[in-house]
Image: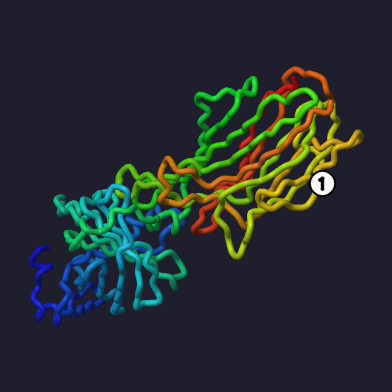
């Protein structure tokens, strides 16, 4: 490999390598060196990416010219007689610090898209496409990965370019700040499994002991090359207490991102605090206890937006029920308009004949929960919050009765728009009383 890397410029200018019916000719500039790349051509790949290796045809020792300048890379090579030139600048490193991602600033071929360009020191052999090379060279340590998608193909078609034992100049001097990874697997393929995990450890809902909370994790599992898992953990908090007789009480309900992660057991260089999962079409629904009704409501939140959306807003619907009886969320709801962030909504009807017993708050579809991938585990994540004021109109003490607190949302792939869990319901039943 070292001899191939240090070929004379004369040989570089005249080299022609025959691969079947394809001919590759590479020229080097004085600032570049010639390396040997293993190129895997894979066509007819399924939607999960699970047959990449089975469908790959390996083109071995393809010459590629690479020049390094400060934080920039320039790559020149040919695929099927088509010259390709790529210029890129370093973006940052992964969580463990052994991988550098690059942003492509120039691509000469419009028929291909760069899915990822990354350099890895101490790469995991199991995640490499060119498995035969790793078998023959078990001591290979570094790799430069350039994964290309044929954007004009009628079926999924890719070229996986891997340059082994390439040494990136100044790798240790690259800023160690964790950058947004390419996550090409979840951008390109569908998960083989999607589900939601519940973690209710250490939580008591009886007696309305505040704050009562519960965590849920939306999980997507992929099987392209190696097992790849993305997760989005949310926490539901209901700050609910008993209501004083003849008085009022403020209740708070919050849906918050507390953790995001990507895990790849066979290739830990891809592990990190990010995922492509986001929550859209979020709404909150709640009921009032016996002898009580909603008096007002405010909303709050920190969310990402699409398009030209301005302030956070939600549409409000309410349902009426008997003051002295329990109500369910299945009742008829009436629209009452919308409310902007931090504005108190006072359009509820509370009279002797009508009491607002059910509340439905649908946050604008232009906003979604998707946390910053560089979020530290101790930082506050994106959230939606509904704060209501309930009034006791009965002026009598009651025993514990159950109220419902329910969040409804849709889990999607932020990069592709693919829906994983439509109208997923996180419902809580809480016991409260008037005393």
Left or right of residue 306, residue 225 in this image: left
Please provide percent x and percent y for residue 67. Answer: 20, 72
Q: How has the structure been colored for display?
A: rainbow
Please provide percent x and percent y for residue 53. Answer: 32, 56
Q: Nearer the viewer, residue 263 or 233?
A: 233
Q: Nearer the viewer, residue 309 or 412?
A: 309
Rendered view: 33 above or below 264: below
For the residue carrying disc 1, how many other residues have a C-alpha within 10 Å: few (<14), some (14-19), or many (20+)?
A: some
Image quarter of the N terminus: bottom left
Q: Secondary structure at mark 1?
A: strand
Left or right of residue 211, residue 39 in this image: left
Rendered view: 24 above or below 253: below
Please provide percent x and percent y for residue 25. Answer: 21, 79
Residue extending farthest right: 353
Question: Residue at (28%, 61%) from the top-left corner?
Answer: 145
Q: Quadrant of residue 395?
A: top right
Question: Residue at (83%, 28%) from the top-left corner?
Answer: 393
Rendered view: 6 above or below 195: below
Image quarter of the C terminus: top right
Q: Quadrant of residue 383?
A: top right
Question: Residue at (29%, 51%) from the top-left corner?
Answer: 127
Residue extending farthest front: 247
Please provide percent x and percent y for residue 129. Answer: 29, 56
Query: Mark 1 — residue?
Result: 334
Q: Nearer the viewer, residue 341 or 127?
A: 341
Question: Residue at (23%, 78%) from the top-left corner?
Answer: 23
Rendered view: 5 above or below 253: below
């Amino acid at each position: 490999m070292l001899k191939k890397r240090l070929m004379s410029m004369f040989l570089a200018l005249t080299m022609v390598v025959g691969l079947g019916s394809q001919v590759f000719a590479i020229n080097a500039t004085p600032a570049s060196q010639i390396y040997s790349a293993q190129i895997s051509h894979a066509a007819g790949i399924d939607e999960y990416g699970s047959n990449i290796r089975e469908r790959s045809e390996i083109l071995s020792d393809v010459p590629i010219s690479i020049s390094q300048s400060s934080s920039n890379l320039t790559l020149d090579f040919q695929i099927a007689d088509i010259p390709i030139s790529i210029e890129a600048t370093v973006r940052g490193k992964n969580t463990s610090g052994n991988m550098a991602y690059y942003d492509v600033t120039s691509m000469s071929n419009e028929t291909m898209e760069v899915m990822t360009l990354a350099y890895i020191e101490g790469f995991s052999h199991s995640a490499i496409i060119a498995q035969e090379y790793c078998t023959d060279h078990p001591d290979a340590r570094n790799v430069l990965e350039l994964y290309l998608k044929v954007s004009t193909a009628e079926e999924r078609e890719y070229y996986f370019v891997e340059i082994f034992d390439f040494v990136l100049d100044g790798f240790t001097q690259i800023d160690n700040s964790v950058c947004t990874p390419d996550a090409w697997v979840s951008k390109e393929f569908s998960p083989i499994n999607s589900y939601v995990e519940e973690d209710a450890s250490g939580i008591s809902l009886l007696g309305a002991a505040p704050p009562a909370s519960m965590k849920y994790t939306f999980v997507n599992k992929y099987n392209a090359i190696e097992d790849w898992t993305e997760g989005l953990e949310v926490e539901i908090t209901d700050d609910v207490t008993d209501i004083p007789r003849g008085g009022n009480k403020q209740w708070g309900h919050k849906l918050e991102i507390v953790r995001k992660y990507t895990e790849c057991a066979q290739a830990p260089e891809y592990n990190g605090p990010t995922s492509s999962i986001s929550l859209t079409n979020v709404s909150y629904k709640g009921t009032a206890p016996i002898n009580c009704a909603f008096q007002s409501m405010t909303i709050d939140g920190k969310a990402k937006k699409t398009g030209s959306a301005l302030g956070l807003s939600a549409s409000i619907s309410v349902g009426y029920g008997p003051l002295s009886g329990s109500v369910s969320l299945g009742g008829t709801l009436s629209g009452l308009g919308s409310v902007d962030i931090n504005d108190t909504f006072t359009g509820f009807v509370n009279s002797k004949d009508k009491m607002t017993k059910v509340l439905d708050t649908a946050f604008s579809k232009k906003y979604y929960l998707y946390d910053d991938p560089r979020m530290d585990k101790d930082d506050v994540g994106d959230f939606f919050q509904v704060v209501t004021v309930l009034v006791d109109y009965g002026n009598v003490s009651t025993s514990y009765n159950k109220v419902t607190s329910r969040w409804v949302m849709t889990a999607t792939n932020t990069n592709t728009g693919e829906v994983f869990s439509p109208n997923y319901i996180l419902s809580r039943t809480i016991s409260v009383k008037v005393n």
